[in-house]
């Protein structure tokens, strides 16, 4: 079992990574009182909940099961969770377990941060995306009808358990979507890691456990280092948004249907790398390595032709990371060396979006 420690304020958050580790964790170290509530969804409840429950035999355990889907990461589910917690008269010594992908993680952690002004939280992420990205760094939240993740907070857990055995049941498309965020850590932080991903794409796609543990460990270490330096995203945490300006615009244009987050980010990362090669000092060789790695994993690198360019531009213009009326793009000087610019002309972006459509 591998371990990363995320140091935030005065808190040391252990992150355990390994295969079939869930039964090996002594949860009593991370639970204050006797009450534990697992928040999960119907898919996870059917596949993995019975086994997980065995780890909490010592505690007064309850479960709250939501329907599956991004559309349930909303104020309605948030209210239902609070209704459940209030009706069951839980106190501040409650521990909430977020058991699922990023949707459950964001919703359950926001509930843990707001119920009685904050109770204990444990993350058990079950998708690759949730393991390498959403469960690390404390961003919690729900969607508003006017936009994604517009309501939320920073809430860190007591511990995060990343068990690679959950990947066996994860649909391939979801797994590959998570790989896009893993590739991102290579692009923004380490050419060696990016090359390793490129060389080992086949074994990774076969979900070989030693490869999964290695890539999750490298990703979690990379994200932890960034978050430790800039928890509230006033500086370098924004590098984690590499490819996300266009990625989010594509997702919004498609109303979050028919394209997964990682797929949209993959297109966005190719786009940002192309701009970096045109406007900055990213070499063609490094651009090719980035694009080729994404392609090797079956990720898309061009914008679907059926999304009108005007829609994408409108959404880039509304990007919530926009500062003082200008759009921020994270670009590369070279692999591992990012910078942020707000000086890209929208007409230039529009022309490029058109040329990127397949
Ligand atoms: P998700 O939570 O919807 O999970 C994807 C699908 O896989 C769902 O149908 C889910 O039921 C299913 N699933 C989960 N684990 C499974 C398993 N082990 N076996 C079989 N099926 C399984 O999606 P996601 O990609 O994990 O997360 C996306 C969400 O994460 C978005 O809401 C996004 O905004 C959020 N996010 C948050 C952060 C953050 O920093 N907090 C970062 C990135 C993304
Ligand atoms: N997923 C980007 C971040 O956590 O900041």
Image (cartoon, rainbow, N blue to C red):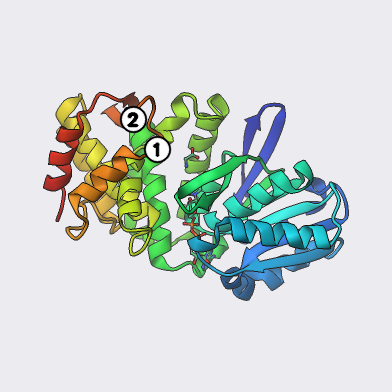
282 horizontally vs 206: left or right: left
Image quarter of residue 268: top left
- The structure residue drawn at horizontal position 31% and vertical position 32%, both measured from the top left corner, is 329
Residue 189 lies, in percent from the top left, at 39, 32
- The structure residue drawn at horizontal position 35% and vertical position 37%, both measured from the top left corner, is 242
Residue 241 lies, in percent from the top left, at 40, 37
Instruction: Specify whether tag 1 is near ligand 2 (CB below 8 Å).
Output: yes
> Residue beneath label 1, please?
241
In depth, the one of 5 and 10 nearer the eye is 10
> Residue beneath label 2, please?
328
Disc 2, SS: loop
- The structure residue drawn at horizontal position 58% and vertical position 70%, both measured from the top left corner, is 67
Q: Residue furthest bottom?
A: 46
Image quarter of residue 348: top left
Spatial separation of the CA atoms under disc 2 and disc 1: 10 Å
210 horizontally vs 30: left or right: left
* Image marks 2 and 1: residues in contact by CB distance under 8 Å: yes
Of pointers 2 and 1, the one earlier in the residue sequence: 1
């Amino acid at each position: 079992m591998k371990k990363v420690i995320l140091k935030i304020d005065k808190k040391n958050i252990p992150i355990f990574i390994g295969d079939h580790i869930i039964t090996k964790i002594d949860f009593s170290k991370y639970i204050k009182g006797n009450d534990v509530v697992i928040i999960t969804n119907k898919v996870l409840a059917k596949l993995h909940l019975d086994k997980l429950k065995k780890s909490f035999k010592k505690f007064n355990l309850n479960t709250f099961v939501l329907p599956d889907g991004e559309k349930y990461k909303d104020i309605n589910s948030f209210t239902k969770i609070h209704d459940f917690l209030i009706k069951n008269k839980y106190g501040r010594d409650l521990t909430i377990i977020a058991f699922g992908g990023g949707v459950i993680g964001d919703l359950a952690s926001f509930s843990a941060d707001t119920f009685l002004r904050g109770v204990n939280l444990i993350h058990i992420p079950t998708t690759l995306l949730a393991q390498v990205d959403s469960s690390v760094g404390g961003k919690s939240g729900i969607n508003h009808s006017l936009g994604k993740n517009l309501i939320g907070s920073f809430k860190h857990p007591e511990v995060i358990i990343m068990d690679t055995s959950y990947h066996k049941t994860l649909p391939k498309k979801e797994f590959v979507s998570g790989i896009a965020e893993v590739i991102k850590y290579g692009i923004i932080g380490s050419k060696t890691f990016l090359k390793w991903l490129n060389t080992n794409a086949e074994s990774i796609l076969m979900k070989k456990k030693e490869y999964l543990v290695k890539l999750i460990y490298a990703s979690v270490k990379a994200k932890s280092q960034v978050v430790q330096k800039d928890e509230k995203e006033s500086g370098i945490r924004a590098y984690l948004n590499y490819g996300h300006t266009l990625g989010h615009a594509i997702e919004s244009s498609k109303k979050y249907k028919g394209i997964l987050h990682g797929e949209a980010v993959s297109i966005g990362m190719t786009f940002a790398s192309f701009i970096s090669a045109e406007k900055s000092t990213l070499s063609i060789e490094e651009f090719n390595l980035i694009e080729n790695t994404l392609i090797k994993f079956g990720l898309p690198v061009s914008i679907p032709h059926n999304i009108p360019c005007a829609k994408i531009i409108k959404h880039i213009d509304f990007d919530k990371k926009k500062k003082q009326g200008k759009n921020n793009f994270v670009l590369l000087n070279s692999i591992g060396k990012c910078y942020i610019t707000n000086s890209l002309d929208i007409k230039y972006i529009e022309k490029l979006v058109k040329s990127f459509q397949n």
